Image: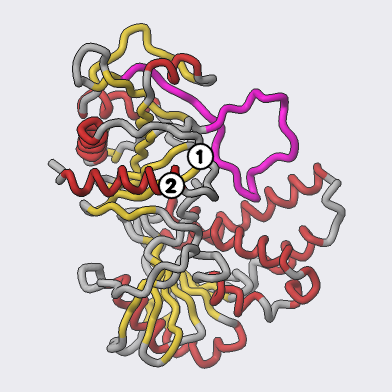
Amino acid sequence: MFDKSLIQEIINAWNSDQNNPRRDRLKQPIPELSIIRKLIEIAFIASLEKEEDRAITFSLSLFNEDMSKSLRGAMGFNKPFPLNVETVTKLAPAIDPEMSSFVVSKSDTTDELLLCGVVSFSQPENRFNKVPGQIGNLSCTRPDVFTLTTIHPGSLLITRGNSQIGRFAKGEFVAATPSPFAPTAMGKYIFSFVEQHELYKKYGESYWHIYRDSLDFILSEAAARSNGASIVLVNENHFPAIKKGFIHGYRFFKKYGIKELFSEYMNYPTIDIPRDIKMRKMMSERLQLIAQYTSIDGALILSDLLDVVSFGTKLSAGTWSGEVLVGPDGFNRGGQDFRYDHFGTRHKSAIDFVGEHENAIVFVLSQDGPIRGFVKINHKTILCWPDCTVSMFI
């Protein structure tokens, strides 16, 4: 089904990640091309199936038999099943990809792949769900093996441990890069908003890290809650000049008070663990409420202080005639043309809006998984970051 060159791209990305000295990887041999190809084809076709009229989600982790038996959190079936589309579709509801994955191994006697059991692990941590301290070594980490996880129908995430290798969507493979929020990438333009904030002047980098994590949390929550959306980040100081580009849908007469929550969170001793947990829970709930507004058709407009300006908003702007280039990532790659002509009206309206309003940043959440970010850097150039999820770490 898939060309060998595509599978080779994935293998090359695995080897590049493993040999990168900054990744500090254990040397895990990647299986041969034919095995990877078979696993991807089964996962891809299964991701298009539905169970009781709902799209399914699942994760497949490719082990050798010795690794799966010795891994904490692995529960083996008393008899392995042949790995095929029908088996995966039937058993997928038993799997929550954030906490578990099917154990897959190659048969000892044939080239057949077997579904041998389930391995469980702790959910990925972020600033808002991390609980200080641990209880011994009871937690289980994601297995450091070749893993495929469904995101949306026809879209697969390729990972090892808690890190991404890349993303397979629309028949193409895109290797992972460091987070675009890095200072050398899109973070530079977001930071130009943040450095003007009172809390940054008071708390410096600590505030920037909280702000960056909060924006990332909104994006990830919005991606999980909507089937495609746009989020526009607007510098409040420039709002009078930009507001003519909005046809507002729904607006509130009060603010959500994110700034006040940030201030309260930072203005107490970090050794007060119970209060720290309560504050982070309150912040996460507030940010989740904001993300939910992307479920309404139209753009969600946020101020640079992450307050809701309006939602269900229509963007209005003239057609952009300049160039759109891929923005630099944390490895200083980028600069090639971003071909947006095969994307839908949501991407086009985002590009047109940014092209007319340089003091705005637009994120487009697509149904195929990636979150794309757009920034205008001069009168003839817009930069696009093709995937604004935290690319190398899940």
- Residue 327 image offset from top left, x and y in percent: 41, 72
Kind of residue indicated by mark 2 = Asp
Placement of 140 over or under 124, stated as above or below: above
Name the residue carrying label 1: 25
Label 2–label 1 contact, CB within 8 A: yes
Q: Nearer the viewer, residue 226 or 270?
A: 270
User: Is residue 110 among what the camera can see?
Assistant: yes
**71 or 29, nearer to the observer:** 29
Q: In front here: 159 or 366?
A: 159
Q: Which residue is mark 2?
A: 17
Toward the viewer: 391 or 306?
391
| Residue 281: image location, x then y, percent | 68, 48
Can residue 52 be seen at all in this image of the molecule?
no
Q: In the drawing, what numbered circle is on residue 371?
A: none
Q: Is residue 203 left or right of residue 235?
A: right
| Rendered image quadrant of residue 141 | top right
- The residue positioned farthest toward the top in the image shown: 78
Give SS at disc 2.
helix
Q: Is tag 2's residue or tag 1's residue first in the polypeptide sequence?
A: 2
Kind of residue at badge 1: Arg
**Residue 166 colored in magenta in the image:** no
- Which residues fall within the magenta stretch? 115-141
Callout 2: 10 Å neighbours few (<14), some, many (20+)? Answer: many
- Residue located at (65% from left, 23% from top): 138
